[in-house]
Image (cartoon, coloured by chain):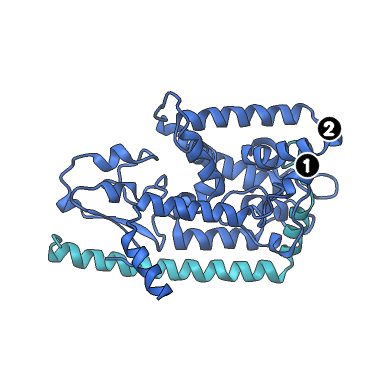
Chain colours: A cyan, B blue
Amino acid sequence: MGWNQNLRSKSRMDGSRRTAVQIILLSLTVCAMVWGVYRGEMPIVLNKAVNVCLECIGLG
Amino acid sequence: MFVWNVLDWGNYMKFSQEMKRKIIQIAAFGYSNTYLHNFANGQLYKGQWKQFCNPGLNCYSCPAARLSCPIGAMQAVSGSVNFNISFYAMGFILAAGVLFGRAICGFVCPFGLIQELLYKVPFPKRKLWKGFTYIKYILLVLFVLIFPAACTNELGMGAPAFCEYICPAGTLEGGIPLLAAHPELRKTIGTLFSLKACILIATLAGCLAVCRFFCKVMCPLGAIYGILNKISVYHMEADKDNCISCGKCRDICPMDVNPVENPGSAECIRCGKCAANCPEQVLFLRFRHR
């Protein structure tokens, strides 16, 4: 509303750069998750989470 | 007719931003801790949901917990025999952070809701010295990333150092309920539990005096989301040209942030109190960049 033309174009430039960083990071994180699942990390998490973790509650 | 009534009720009821946030927080708390009946028998939920991470901090040793704590999951994998780093948990945390930043702390973290309720208890309120907010980054690097992978036993397994030595959420949500339900576990109480109980008491006292004390000072998950606040899809924008510098946003902020000066602050939990109270409406929380 009160933004002048220069600020608006600068903001658009920042916005597109920001969007590019977001897309790259999201792609990398999705790849990391898929790689983690593929190499079998989920069963380790499940095994830890379904048993009482004595260290986590201060008894281990 | 029924649909019209519901829509009409929705239009009629004007929920404030804070009320909407509270509803989301309670719903997220309920979804994260579905199995409340487990508190009575001291059992943990053992279903398949436990292999998925909760975006907020919620101990997986809590009897009611449906999902896994992402910080616990990260340490469990990095401390295992075969792996030194958890791509699954790290990828999940980073993806959630890129999408929402610390809005996760403000909207869906169960321990965040507990802290906000504690802060409502009448108690002398204090402002936190800003230097303390850097402690969480030290805890993240040392206790979450380095120690579980580096300090291993003869089998090559590392302990979940943050959970073991620091996490007051684990003591509160997991330790105390399980000790209450299992008398045989009480025999194993030693120095470690005493240390963790002291940390829990100090944290709870801190939460009575300082809003979201744990989030500000100790939370490694908040530290990661905070770093991603600057580039997250859900973000805050400030129209500085139209700001009249009344300071209302700074005064109302529970995280002691000046949102006009620093809308991407690592401490901002995107609660929206500043935007809702701005008389000139120069603060915006949105997904798309203007």
Quadrant of image for the C terminus of chain B: bottom left
Using the image, determine if residue B197 lies above or below residue A43. above
In the rendered image, residue B141, in percent from the top left (x then y), is placed at 58, 44
Q: Is residue B11 left or right of residue A53?
A: left
* Residue that carries the numbered disc 2 in the rendered image: B188
Q: Nearer the viewer, residue B220 or A52?
A: A52
Choose top left, top right, bottom left or bottom right for residue B200.
top right
- The residue at 49%/52% (across/down) is B25
Choose top left, top right, bottom left or bottom right for residue B285.
bottom left
Q: Secondary structure at mark 2?
A: helix
**Tally of marks:** 2
- The residue at 27%/68% (across/down) is A13
Chain for mark 1? A
Q: Is residue B271 visible?
A: no
Quadrant of image for the N terminus of chain B: bottom left
- The residue at 46%/53% (across/down) is B23
Q: Is residue B256 visible?
A: yes
- The residue at 57%/44% (across/down) is B140
Q: Nearer the viewer, residue B215 or B32?
A: B32
How much space separates mark 2 and mark 1, taking CA atoms?
10 Å
Q: Answer whether labels 2 and 1 touch (C-beta < 8 Å).
A: yes
Q: Secondary structure at mark 1?
A: loop
Q: Is residue B69 left or right of residue A28?
A: right
In the displayed orientation, state which residue is furthest to the front.
B1
Q: Residues within 10 Å of mark 1 (few under 14, many from 20)?
A: some
In the displayed orientation, state which residue is furthest to the top.
B124
Residue type highlighted by circle 1:
Leu
* Residue that carries the numbered disc 1 in the rendered image: A54
